[in-house]
Image: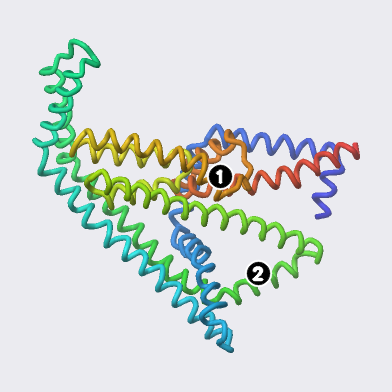
Amino acid sequence: MKLWKKIRQDRLLSNILTVCVGILLYMGLSHFNMVAAFFLSVNRIIAPILVGFVLAYLIDPIAMFFEHRPFGKMKKEKERRFAAVILAIFVVLALIVLFFIALIPSLTSCIKGIYTNKEIYIENMDDLLKTINNWHIVPHLDMPLITEHIEELINTAFDYMSENIGQVIKVSKNVGSAFLNALIGFILCIYFLSGKSHLIAGINEFRAAAMTEEKMKTHTDFWLRCHKIFIQFLGYDLVDGLIVGMVNAIVMLILGMPYVALISVIVGVTNLLPTFGPVIGLIIGGLLLILVNPVYALWFLIMVIVIQTIDGYILKPKLFGGALGIPPVWTLIAIIIGGKLFGAAGILLAIPTAAVINFLYQENFLPWLKRRKGNI
């Protein structure tokens, strides 16, 4: 602290530090791919620990609910906490099992249909083109030539899938690695949840030894606010994705579309990813439906646009209430950087992280600059 105070008071040291930070920032931006590769390497090493921590962070509110409600009358704290953690884990596992029970049959049917109904897909596209031609929307369509190109495109796609089965095996290995990380992380999650009081006590003991009482209070307020932002965003984002997925499933059932469970899950999960997520869900769902019946894909496109419009202008503002308060341009920048460094998890956490940086800038950095300007 004394060194930092000395640097701030000494103009030469302050300027040297500013130049060094600027050089480091320039080097980091000019070698962004190397920086991203470094973070990805570190992420692979500590992935199970991060998975365990994140799972514990997300499941802890459920465990706390059970700890204070159903098991609130239990006298022994350890037994109460252990029972709450076990019940919370059971609820989460039950939801995961139900998720896969709903998803796997539809996924299997979809994959089987893609490989066995190639000729039907070509016929459907041919019928659609004939219908468009009869409407005279685009005059003088060369139907035989267009049909030939579409057949070539579909055949090329199927040949590509057959020839690149090795890539499927590679992806399977990555899925296996992710599953192993998730399994280890889940075990660590149980330990984190069960030993929460000991972990917090150890952290508080370290903070008390390293900080003054005033600094510790400021530090605690900061982390409580960060916790509120992340829990609010993740909780409301999950609710928003669930609502969008359920509405999508209901409308698809009404319209008699196939692959309801699979596409609705895809739409709901991709909706968790800000900005680009709904577009990804629209593309995947549209590609699955256009092979079965192009009319379904058209209705799906209209349906998703309507749902996302309602979600963006009514549902999301009601849920989030504008509490995060981040300018759109910074949101986009945060999503791009988070996705580049940490993949899907980085995209998901980009907005709450940007919100934390924003309130630090508004409430700490800017006031410090003003005080510094007044002292010059």
Residue 203: give its label.
Answer: 2
Asked if residue 166 lies left or right of residue 208, the reply is left
Can residue 278 be seen at all in this image of the molecule?
yes
Find disc 1 in the rendering and name its residue.
Answer: 317
- Residue lying at the far top in this picture: please name it: 140
* Camera-side residue of 22 and 198: 198
Instruction: Please report the residue visible at 55 percent of the width from the left and 36 percent of the height from the top.
Output: 333
Q: Secondary structure at mark 2?
A: helix
Residue under the point 56% across and 82% down = 72
Colour mode?
rainbow
- On screen, residue 365 versus residue 81, left or right, reads right
Q: Is residue 355 visible?
A: no
Image check: 271 left or right of 263? right
Element class at badge 1: helix
Q: Residue at x 54, y 72 (%)?
A: 65
Pick whichever, 21 or 205, lies toward us.
205
Kindly identify the amino acid type of the residue bearing the numbered disc 2.
Ile
Question: Few, some or many C-alpha atoms within 10 Å of disc 1 (few <14, some 14-19, many ≥20)?
Answer: few
Q: Percent from the top left, x then y, of residue 207?
A: 71, 67
Number of marks in the rendered image: 2
* Circle 1/circle 2 CB separation < 8 Å: no
The quadrant holding residue 200 is: bottom right
Residue 155 picture quarter: top left
- The mark closer to the camera, 1 or 2, is 1
Q: What amino acid is at disc 1?
A: Pro
Please tell me whether residue 241 is drawn above or below residue 327 in the rendered image.
below
Label drawn at residue 255? none
Nearer-N-terminus badge (1/2): 2
Is residue 179 depicted above or below 245 in this figure?
A: below
Establish if 273 lies above or below 65.
above
Q: Please state the horizontal and vertical placement of residue 8, each as a whole percent of the image.
A: 83, 44
